[in-house]
């Protein structure tokens, strides 16, 4: 894959145009809409930006920081978000399928209906996050920090959730939990239903 670099100044110029496109309720195919494909981004610090409906695919943002940014409805497939910080961000209906979010910090973010299918969230921090109705299908959550996380209506299918500490989860009674893998190597038989629920709620 041929990945070209984009520096922070270029990215800020693109995000400003994107915000203007949102305010103007512009057409979907407008050149002002933020579309980034196969780009490497030098670590940036972005705050209070509206990146909703952006399309960012196969990009490398590792080490970047986002504070109170809005990614609602954004297409964020197959990106490298390792070691990124997303403080109090909005990810409602965002699609992060296949993205590498290892060691990322999503503290205080709202992620209702987010799609983390096949994403890597190993060692990620999800404290105080709302993952209601999220898709966590084949998602790797091993060693993730799950303190005070809402999982109401979430789909946990083939999810890997091993940790050495207890979880602090709510809303599991309405979640779909099937074939959850609960050991460090994800090699033991998966658990479903009450067995998986008892593991996730263990004190």
Image (cartoon, rainbow, N blue to C red):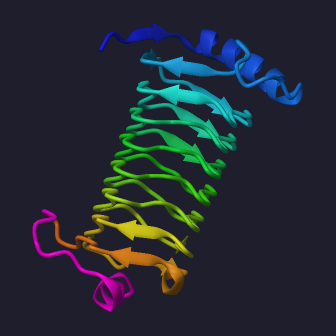
Residue 170 in the image: state x and y as whole percent: 53, 81
| Apparent side of residue 190 relative to residue 41 in the rendered image (left or right) | left
Q: Quadrant of the N terminus?
A: top left
Vertical arrangement, residue 48 with respect to residue 92, above or below = above
Is residue 32 left or right of 118 when viewed as pictured? right
For residue 65, which quarter of the picture? Answer: top right
Query: In this rendering, would 75 be left or right of 121?
Result: right
Viewer-side residue, 134 vs 104: 134
Q: Position of residue 51 (x, y in %)?
A: 68, 33
Task: Write the residue at 10% across / 66% down.
Answer: 187
Q: Which residues are magenta?
A: 185-203
Residue at 74% of width from left, 34% of height from top? 50
Query: Between residues 133 and 16, which one lies in front from this camera angle?
Result: 133
Residue drawn at (47%, 60%), measured in percent from left and top? 135
**Does residue 186 appear left or right of residue 98 in this picture?**
left
Looking at the picture, how far across and down is residue 119, in whole percent? Answer: 36, 48
Q: Is residue 167 above or below residue 1?
A: below
Image quarter in which the C terminus is found: bottom left
Q: Position of residue 176 (x, y in %)?
A: 44, 76
Does the magenta portion include 201? yes
């Amino acid at each position: 894959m041929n990945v070209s670099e984009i520096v922070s100044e270029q990215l800020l110029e693109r995000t400003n145009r994107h915000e203007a496109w949102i305010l103007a309720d512009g057409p979907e195919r407008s050149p002002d809409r933020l579309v980034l494909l196969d780009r490497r981004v030098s670590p940036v610090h972005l705050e209070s930006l509206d990146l909703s409906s952006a399309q960012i695919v196969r990009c490398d943002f590792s080490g970047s920081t986002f504070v109170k940014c809005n990614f609602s409805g954004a297409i964020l497939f197959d990106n490298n978000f390792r070691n990124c910080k997303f403080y109090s961000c909005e990810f409602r209906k965002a699609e992060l399928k296949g993205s590498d979010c290892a060691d990322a910090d999503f503290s205080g973010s709202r992620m209702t209906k987010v799609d983390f299918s096949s994403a890597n969230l190993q060692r990620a921090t999800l404290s105080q996050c709302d993952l209601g109705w999220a898709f966590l299908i084949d998602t790797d959550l091993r060693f993730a920090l799950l303190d005070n996380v809402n999982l109401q209506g979430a789909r946990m299918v083939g999810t890997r959730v091993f940790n050495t500490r207890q979880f602090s989860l709510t809303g599991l009674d309405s979640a779909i939990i099937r074939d959850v893998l609960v050991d460090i190597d994800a090699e033991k038989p998966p658990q479903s239903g009450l067995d998986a629920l008892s593991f996730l709620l263990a004190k």
